[in-house]
């Protein structure tokens, strides 16, 4: 079962990722393609800012009244024959789905891409119980064959070259070593076809839940979602509670934002708007439709404005694509289901903050993510908020991962900066130390870290104040 | 022992400082986001352009219910087994003298049969000009798998059913919603390998829309 | 906080301005401060230098806003005592930090109000100069010059057009628009020393664009970005000069 790198070790993970030349090349090439796609998409969206604003307003309203919309969704879904289940956490979700799978007597299930199922480690739960769980999204299937976790939330195998994938397929399914992308895709199609036909259960996520109709909306390009949700007798959707929208009509703005942000398309190839299982015996579609509503830490995020906005995320991946950190190290270094900028703010809220304390610091705070986010999440503000929670704590919460020496050092520096006279004394001392002990200081933090690949800045012989005084003399 | 349902709702309410009786204002109004001023002819033109842009093919068959177009397509693909929906437009074609001998499956074919089809012929309930999208409503026609499993999909689209934009389409959908409403914009595709576009993955690799 | 009508008007009217050079400039690159003062005088301002030290950004950045608050109070108090019309900084990130001071005092209405008063009249140098009416920069510099957008200046204050506009007017300057000019340089505050290899890797991507454009001078509005990029350029022995915007705009005018 694929394991994440330890999320506590982001600095070490990042260093290792920087040594991986093949991965860096792939990320560089991907960044250029994503950039090109963004331009294309934006050219078809003159009203982009209006769309963003509209979408954010709908999300804010929905989240502020989430209890109402959850209940409305449940009522309307039940009315159409959907079975609605609730899971407080990952363990409960896994147990629920496993129970449903056992009830259905399934030994094989097909899965379409769902980050939520990654979050609860569903494949592991199923495999442990002797139920084969096959990913059907091409990128997810590649990662499954490679026994790796996804590298990106939209393009899971972006870090692998065609050659690497061809080698993987040759080893696992016997395709020729020099197969091109078309041949590899065709091989995947053939292999997975049989799984679709034989599976007793299809498991998906959902991009949106519609409260007024009790419906799910799922976007895709490959067709595996349509197959997963049409062919097997039972369809189970695991969906975070934040995916709710009030009305069918609200889909308009989100279906304009998500394809463009996610893949640079005006529209993804397929959208499935699903409302209940089949109604008559002879109809097509699943006999049973189950929706498992997952909390797993989301409800807590509702409590404050600054954290609640993370629940507006529509999982487009645009923030990953423009992030200077992600572009260098990729998804695995974050050690969490959700990587990149959104991962750096969501993961520390879904898991105990102390376990994810490195993630809010995995950013230069450049703000490129905020610029591209289709629902205008202020990720940098959230990162700063989380950094404070980690080091200082706030109000009633203690610091999640305090660093006592660092805090002491900060206190000392802040003290010497607080008054102009102290400041000048401190700098005079610093200059003296630089003069006599510079040879030692350069080997101590922070100069030691600065000097990894850069020359250190020097203290000017005469500071600005001195120059200004001279200049001001008549 | 609280149920997960009660527990989650309680957590949501506590965090939002709401109760079960708290009021819910109306959601923000839905703005009209797409163009509304195209006439039927302009919509057809735009639909054709957008369909072509995503790799689909448009054929006109308004005079003959799509007969000539479908004849040509079947001659080109020479399918060994044709899946079909139960739409009247499809049945009419199938019943025509020139097409009767083709290897049609029955409209209620089994799943096993559908998996072996080389080509599927269905109608479409609506289309969206702005994006070149077909809208298939599952409870109006039995076309969920015939439009998905075979590598080639031919969709007969009534020319009067082309709507301008997505907002309009969502509004037009009959309520209560069909168990499955499927929006199709071109053939299936992926860019999961080095972000290189490959057409034809799990869904059809060719999409032909015949306007009738 | 971009250029609302109020802020451009405040800048246009400002006569006495406080120049806060930032701690980095003060101690490592004081010439930037002199250049900035020269430019402000050139647009007819009376420049005062107060007893300011640090805007507090490193503390907020590291998760210790409690340590930034006293510094913010000191700065606010200093500007109030000076009674100036505007506070100008040769740094997008420090100017942005000061415009965020009201958030530091979210739970202290009295200080929040004083912070808002200062935030409304705090400006990054190039925006201030343009809004004050500078159409031609007084300096002269014979060089191919490229521009790096500092992230906070660009995204929080909307500084983008102003530096480019002014650089183009410097006699002898051949302005070259860099590819990915708005990509982060990798400094990121304490990020630079907490994740140094990553910081340098991001710099290398930026410098690849610099080398591809064959510029002689890389200019930017933040000394911190420049020290980071300069440090990398020197380490790699690449001979591209790094200069602050103020130094280019006032080149040749000050000792």
Image: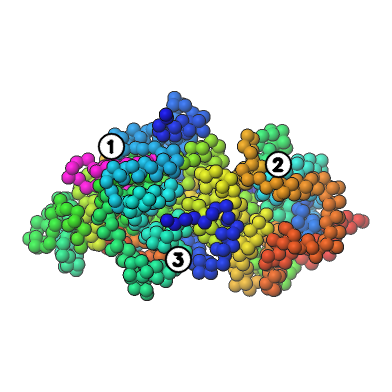
Quarter residue C212 falls in: bottom right
Question: Which residue, given by chain and number where applicable, does mark 1 sit on?
Answer: A80
Mark 2 and mark 1 in contact? Answer it, CB < 8 Å: no
Given this view, does label 3 or label 1 mark the residue nearer the observer?
Answer: 3
Q: Which residues are magenta?
A: A269-294
Could you confirm whether marks 3 and 1 are on the same chain?
Answer: yes
Q: Residues within 10 Å of mark 2 (few under 14, many from 20)?
A: some
Question: Which residue, given by chain and number where applicable, does mark 3 sit on?
Answer: A160
Q: Position of residue C168 (x, y in %)?
A: 67, 65
Question: Which residue, given by chain and number where applicable, does mark 2 sit on?
Answer: C66
In-image side of A459 versus B210 (left or right): right
Q: Position of residue A198 (x, y in %)?
A: 25, 54
Q: Earlier in the sequence, mark 3 or mark 1?
A: 1
- Is residue A449 visible to us here? yes
Quarter residue C41 falls in: bottom right
Q: Position of residue B172 (x, y in %)?
A: 29, 42
- Secondary structure beneath dot 3 equals loop
Quarter residue C225 falls in: bottom right
Q: Is the residue A401 above or below the residue C42 in the image? A: above
The residue at the point 48 percent across, 44 percent down is A312
Q: Quadrant of the C terminus of chain A?
A: bottom right
In-image side of A91 versus A382 (left or right): left
User: Spatial distance from mark 2 to mark 1, Cα to Cα?
Assistant: 54 Å
């Amino acid at each position: 079962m694929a394991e994440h790198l330890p999320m506590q070790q982001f600095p070490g993970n990042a260093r290792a990722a920087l040594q991986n030349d093949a991965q860096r090349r792939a990320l560089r090439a991907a960044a250029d393609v994503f950039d090109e796609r963004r331009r294309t998409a934006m050219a078809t969206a003159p009203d982009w800012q209006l769309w963003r604003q509209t979408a954010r307003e709908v999300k804010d309203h929905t989240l502020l009244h989430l209890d109402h919309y959850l209940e409305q969704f449940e009522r309307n879904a039940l009315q159409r024959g959907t079975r609605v289940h609730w899971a407080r956490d990952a363990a409960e979700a896994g147990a629920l789905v496993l129970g449903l799978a056992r009830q259905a007597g399934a030994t094989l299930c097909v899965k379409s891409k769902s980050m939520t199922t990654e979050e609860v480690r569903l494949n592991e739960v199923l495999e442990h119980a002797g139920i084969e769980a096959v990913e059907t999204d091409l990128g997810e299937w590649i990662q499954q064959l490679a026994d790796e976790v996804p590298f990106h939330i939209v393009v899971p195998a972006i870090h692998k070259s065609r050659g690497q994938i061809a080698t993987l397929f040759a080893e696992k399914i016997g395709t020729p070593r020099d197969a091109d992308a078309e041949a590899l895709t065709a091989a995947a199609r053939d292999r997975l076809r049989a799984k679709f036909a034989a599976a007793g259960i299809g498991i998906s996520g959902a991009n949106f839940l519609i409260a007024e109709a009790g419906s799910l909306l799922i976007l895709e390009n490959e067709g595996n979602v349509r197959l997963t949700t049409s062919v097997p007798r039972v369809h189970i959707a695991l969906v975070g509670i934040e995916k709710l929208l009030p009305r069918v009509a609200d889909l308009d703005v989100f279906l304009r934002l998500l394809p463009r942000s996610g893949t640079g398309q005006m529209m993804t190839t397929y959208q499935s708007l699903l409302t209940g299982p089949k109604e008559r015996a002879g109809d097509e579609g699943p006999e049973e439709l189950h929706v498992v509503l997952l909390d797993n830490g989301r409800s807590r995020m509702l409590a404050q404005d600054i954290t609640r906005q993370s629940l507006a995320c529509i999982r487009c991946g645009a923030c990953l694509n423009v992030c200077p950190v992600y572009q260098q190290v990729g998804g695995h270094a974050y050690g969490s289901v959700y990587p990149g900028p959104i991962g750096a703010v969501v993961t520390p809220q879904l898991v105990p903050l102390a376990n994810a304390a490195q993630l809010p610091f995995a950013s230069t705070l450049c703000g490129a993510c905020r610029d591209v986010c289709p629902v205008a999440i202020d990720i940098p503000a959230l990162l700063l908020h989380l950094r404070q929670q980690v080091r200082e704590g706030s109000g009633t919460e203690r610091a999640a991962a305090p660093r006592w020496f660092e805090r002491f050092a900060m206190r000392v520096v802040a003290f010497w900066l607080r008054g102009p006279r102290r400041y000048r004394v401190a700098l005079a001392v610093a200059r003296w130390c630089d003069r006599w002990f510079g040879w030692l200081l350069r080997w101590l933090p922070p100069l030691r870290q600065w000097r990894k690949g850069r020359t250190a800045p020097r203290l000017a012989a005469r500071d600005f104040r001195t120059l200004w005084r001279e200049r001001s003399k008549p | 022992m609280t149920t997960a349902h009660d527990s989650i709702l309680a957590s949501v309410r506590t965090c939002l400082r709401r109760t079960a009786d708290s009021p819910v204002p109306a959601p923000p109004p839905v703005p009209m986001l797409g163009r509304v001023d195209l006439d039927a002819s302009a919509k057809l033109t735009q639909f054709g352009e957008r369909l072509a842009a995503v790799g689909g093919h448009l054929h006109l068959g308004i005079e003959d219910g799509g007969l000539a177009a479908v004849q040509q397509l079947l001659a080109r693909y020479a399918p060994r087994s044709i899946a079909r929906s139960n739409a009247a437009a499809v049945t009419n074609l199938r019943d025509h003298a020139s097409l009767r001998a083709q290897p049609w499956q029955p409209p209620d074919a089994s799943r096993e049969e559908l998996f072996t089809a080389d080509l599927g012929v269905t109608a479409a309930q609506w289309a969206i000009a702005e994006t070149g999208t077909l809208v298939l409503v599952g409870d109006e026609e039995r076309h969920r798998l015939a439009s998905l499993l075979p590598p080639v999909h031919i969709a007969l689209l009534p020319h009067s059913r082309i709507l301008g934009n997505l907002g309009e389409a969502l509004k037009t959908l009959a309520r209560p919603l069909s168990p499955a409403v499927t929006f199709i914009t071109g053939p299936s595709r992926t860019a999961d390998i080095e972000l290189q576009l490959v057409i034809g993955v799990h869904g059809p690799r060719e999409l032909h829309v015949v306007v009738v | 906080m971009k250029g609302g009508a109020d802020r451009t008007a405040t800048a246009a009217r400002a006569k006495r301005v406080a120049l806060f050079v930032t701690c980095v400039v003060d101690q490592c690159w004081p010439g930037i401060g002199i250049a900035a003062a020269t430019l402000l005088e050139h647009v007819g301002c009376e420049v005062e230098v107060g007893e300011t030290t640090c805007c507090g950004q490193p503390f907020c950045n590291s998760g210790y806003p409690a340590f930034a608050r006293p510094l913010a109070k000191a700065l606010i108090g200093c500007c109030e005592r000076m009674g100036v019309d505007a506070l100008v900084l040769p740094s997008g990130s420090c100017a942005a930090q000061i415009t965020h001071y009201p958030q530091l005092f979210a739970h202290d209405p009295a200080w929040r109000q004083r912070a808002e008063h200062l935030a409304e009249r705090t400006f990054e140098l190039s925006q201030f100069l343009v809004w004050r009416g500078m159409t031609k920069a007084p300096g002269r510099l014979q060089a191919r010059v490229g521009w790096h957008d500092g992230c906070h200046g660009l995204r929080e204050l909307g500084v983008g057009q102003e530096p480019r506009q002014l650089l183009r007017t410097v006699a002898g300057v051949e302005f070259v628009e860099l590819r990915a000019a708005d990509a982060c340089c990798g400094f990121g505050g304490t990020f630079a020393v907490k994740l140094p290899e990553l910081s340098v890797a991001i710099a290398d991507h930026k410098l690849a664009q610099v080398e591809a454009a064959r510029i002689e001078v890389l200019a930017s509005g933040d000394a911190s970005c420049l020290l980071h990029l300069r440090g990398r350029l020197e380490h790699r022995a690449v001979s591209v000069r790094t200069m602050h915007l103020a130094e280019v705009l006032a080149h040749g005018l000050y000792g």
